[in-house]
């Protein structure tokens, strides 16, 4: 299994609505379940403590090829377009694990 974690820092003008953005993105990402092969779970959360990042995505994939295919999947790319209008910074971390 592969876990894909992404942290986003919202633009200052977007930050007050972090919970609303998270809810919208959560819905969009959840819609990828059953559409993106190998995507097993996905969640978006809001950082409730002050920090460098406002939102977090955690997605689990069956394997590395599934995670790689997700990166270029047309439905994922549509969500990325939206995210890029909201954020000023992003970082990601991917690792393999056994369930």
Image (spheres, rainbow, N blue to C red):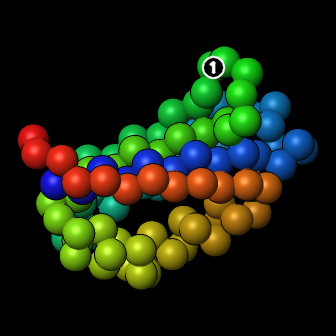
Residue 83: quadrant of the picture:
bottom right
Which residue matches tag 1?
Answer: 48
What residue is shown at x 53% (from left), y 41% (from top)?
A: 56
Q: Is residue 30 visible?
A: no
Q: Nearer the viewer, residue 12 or 91?
A: 91
Q: Position of residue 80 (x, y in %)?
A: 58, 68
Q: Position of residue 57 (x, y in %)?
A: 47, 46
How many marks overall?
A: 1
Q: Nearer the viewer, residue 79 or 55?
A: 55
What residue is shown at x 40% (from left), y 45% (from top)?
A: 58
Image quarter (top left, top right, bottom left or bottom right) of the N terminus: bottom left
Q: Is 58 left or right of 64, judged from the image as shown?
A: right
Q: Nearer the viewer, residue 57 or 82?
A: 57
Q: Is 35 left or right of 26, judged from the image as shown?
A: left
What residue is shown at x 54% (from left), y 73% (from top)?
A: 78
Where is 95 relative to 73, above or below?
above
Q: Position of residue 89 (x, y in %)?
A: 73, 55
Q: Is residue 16 visible?
A: yes
Q: Around disc 1, counting alpha carbons within 10 Å, would you say few (fewer than 14), some (14 to 19), or many (20 or more)?
A: few
Q: Is 37 left or right of 83, judged from the image as shown?
A: left
- What secondary structure is marked by label 1? loop
């Amino acid at each position: 299994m592969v876990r894909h974690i992404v942290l986003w820092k919202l633009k200052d003008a977007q930050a007050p609505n972090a919970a609303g953005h998270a809810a919208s993105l959560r819905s969009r990402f959840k819609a990828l379940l059953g559409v993106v092969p190998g995507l097993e779970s996905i969640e978006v959360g809001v950082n409730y403590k002050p920090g460098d990042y406002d939102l977090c995505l955690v997605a689990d994939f069956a394997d590395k090829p599934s995670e790689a295919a997700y990166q270029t999947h047309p439905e994922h790319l549509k969500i990325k377009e939206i995210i890029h209008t909201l954020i000023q910074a992003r970082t990601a971390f991917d690792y393999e694990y056994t369930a």
